[in-house]
Amino acid sequence: MQNFTAEAHLDRLVRADPAITAHIERELRYGQTRWTEVWLACVMALFGAGLLADGDTFSAPAFRVVRFFVGEDAAGAAGVAVGAARLGALWRHGGRRRSPLVRVAGCATGFLFYTGLALGFVLAFAAVPTGLICGVLAAAELHASGRSARDAVACDSLGLRQRRRVRDQPPS
């Protein structure tokens, strides 16, 4: 059994009510998921800022496939914009009922961003670590989107459970 506090008598009280225990566990899991998303959004925004900085990053041979599809300024602007939007959404709407839907959309966008970079590096036969890092970030985004989707179900973000309760109530 998990201890929530350093005080044994408080832990006994928490375990006595399963609703409180479930609420605490849900809040702990929710916070851990959001911090993962915050760090992934920071990495995306910083990567975009690095592309927007002086220098011609996309002139490197590793970026030739990525450069074929998108310019350096466009990729940098997209990285900064999406990363900043995700950070803003996590900060502003982090604890609200509909926020898991925004988080899922942000994770899906991050997954596409990092997958595109990883594929570009792999197809350009770039150094393995470069594509591998982007692949790991894409996998982290995919994992975070799954956890966000579970939070959306737990929070009833689409209101499906509420509509079902209303529908299944006997007429008065």
Image (tube, rainbow, N blue to C red):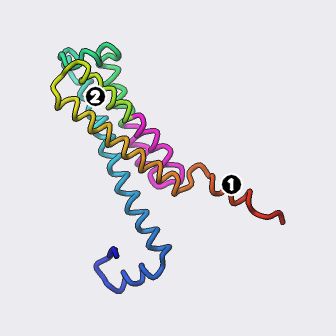
Q: Is residue 100 magenta?
A: yes
Label placed on residue 118:
2
Look at mark 1 in the image and give the residue it sits on. 163
Label 1 is placed on what type of residue?
A: Arg
- Give the magenta part as a residue range: 84-109
Q: Quadrant of residue 123?
A: top left
Q: Label 1: state its secondary structure.
A: helix
Query: Does residue 25 sit above or below 148 in this rendering?
Result: below
Quadrant location, the C terminus: bottom right
77 or 4, nearer to the observer: 4
Q: Where is residue 14 shown, x and y percent of the image? A: 42, 79
Q: Is residue 49 left or right of residue 11?
A: left
**Disc marking residue 105:** none
Residue 144 vs 23, above or below: the answer is: above
Quarter in which the N terminus is drawn: bottom left
Q: Secondary structure at mark 2?
A: helix
| Alpha-carbon span between mark 1 and mark 2 | 42 Å
Instruction: Name which residue lies at 50% across and 73% down.
Output: 19
Q: Residue at x 72, y 58 (%)?
A: 166
Q: Magenta stretch: residue 33 in it?
A: no
Q: Position of residue 114 (x, y in %)?
A: 32, 32
The amino acid pointed to by label 2 is Ala
Q: Quadrant of residue 2?
A: bottom left
Q: Is residue 119 left or right of residue 15?
A: left
Expressed as whole percent of the image width and height from the top left, the position of residue 62 reads 20, 20
Q: Are marks 1 and 2 in contact (CB under 8 Å)?
A: no
Which residue in the rendered view is the most extreme toward the right?
Answer: 172
Lower position in the chain sequence, tag 1 or tag 2: 2
